[in-house]
Amino acid sequence: MSTLQKTIMKNKLPPRCPKTSGVSKLAPFGAGRRKDYTPVSWKQYFERFVDVETDGGTFRVYLSPEPDHPQRPRFVTLHGGGYSGLSWALFTEEITNMVHCQVVSIDLRGHGETKANDSDDLSAETLVKDVEQVLHKLYGDSLPPIILVGHSMGGAIAVRTALLPTLEPFVQGIAVIDVVEGTAMDALASMQSFLRGRPTHFKSIEHAIEWCVRSGQVRNVDSAKVSMPGQIVNCDTGLLATNEVESYQPVEDLGEAGSRHDAPHHDSILEEEGAEGEGMQHHFAKPAVTGDRGMKYRWRIALAGTERHWAGWFRGLSAAFLAARAPRLLLLASVDGLDRELTVGQMQGKFQMQVLTRCGHAVHEDTPGEVARVIAAFVLRHHITTATDNGELMNIASGPPGC
């Protein structure tokens, strides 16, 4: 694995614990130090959902309350591969508290509660067409101002959607979160290995949420509690785990994975020594492999089977981003994330860039308040909307200008 690839993968891992007594702070799953991983309903963050019928299928769309005026902007949020529209739950709560707007969060094809006619067709062209049709179904020809916000794969789709002739006049801004063509294309070679390292099944929804947090996929437990149920389905019913949340009974005993011993065992994940020479090794018990008894949930989408589409999502992304007419914002989890084309464009002042530290790849889930504040300041700077009373008190307009 090249140095660049190691850097990319390291940026996606959870932060290492400091060297103290030599005992890992990430104990195996168990009751001794367990946090509350009980799932939370999406209804705490969104007002309602609608199922939008298009030529491609039926698309689930989560909506925050209607804004105070029909011409307030709609933040159309597009999630990354494997996630769902619920990954924007905490961001929705934050942004609607700061500026007058509505959040429109879409489950993309093959994800969440969306039921597409061909769930395997995840080409960039198809995903862009899906977003276009959903928006026209929702608003007809009289679209309100639109801010496209996308994370990872969703960021690539947001950029291409902004260039569509039918939508371009209505797109007032684009915010892309932690996806850059150069680093994304370099990371694809390691993606299958990364996916093989994930568990395939979970014993309970809590089990999945705990893995999500402790593996570093999402570092914010409050976000994982609402977003992770949108990524897994019940093996028996085939239904998304979100359908069980409101009547869900917490699981007290996770069986073998609930061991309270700090010593590693055959189900433990052992992190390799880092490039900086940290001698500390960290263990936590991962969910058992496919076929083990008691495994009740599996992933909603088999990401490994979508490999043929990966390069198409990201190839040409930097040029497309720079070609968009609307104001552009790029949020990254690492200052080293820019490729050459975007580095030149940033030096020429063609877009705003903000680096948010202390977070992983799912920037909007790890630090939803910071992401919302940066995006709120971005739309206020371009006079796309106005601040709420709370936003005025928070002095959003004078937020960090980015670099």
Image (spheres, rainbow, N blue to C red):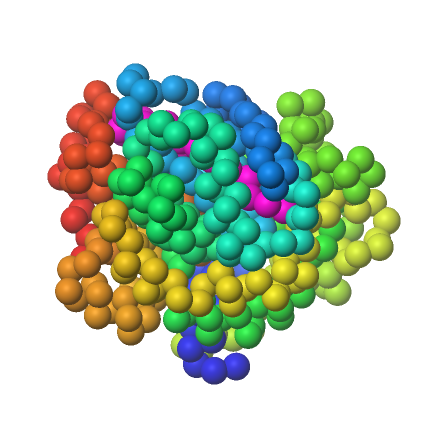
Residue 325 in sight here = yes
User: Residue 402: image x %, image y %?
Assistant: 19, 52
Instruction: Name above or below for residue 10 compared with residue 53.
Output: below
Q: Residue furthest bottom?
A: 2
Residue furthest toward the top?
68
User: Quarter of the image containing the C terminus?
Assistant: bottom left
Seen in the image, is 205 located left or right of residue 291? left
Q: Residue at x 29, y 18 (%)?
A: 69
Q: Does residue 152 sit above or below 101 in this rendering?
A: below
Q: Is residue 102 in the magenta section?
A: yes
- Residue 292's spot in the image, x, y percent? 84, 53
Above or below, comparing residue 149 to residue 355 in the picture? above
Q: Is residue 387 left or right of residue 178?
A: left
Q: Is residue 211 magenta?
A: no
| Frontmost residue, 211 versus 8 | 8
142 displayed left or right of 108: left
Up-down relation of residue 265 to residue 246 (above or below): below
**Pick the front one: 345 or 140:** 140
Q: Quadrant of residue 314?
A: bottom left
Looking at the image, which is closer to me, 259 or 305? 305
Q: Residue at x 55, y 74 (%)?
A: 189
In magenta, the rendered stretch is: 90-110
The image quadrant of residue 143 is top left
Q: Relative to 349, is 120 on the left or the right?
A: right
Location of residue 13 in the rendering, given as x and y in whole percent from the top left corner = 49, 62
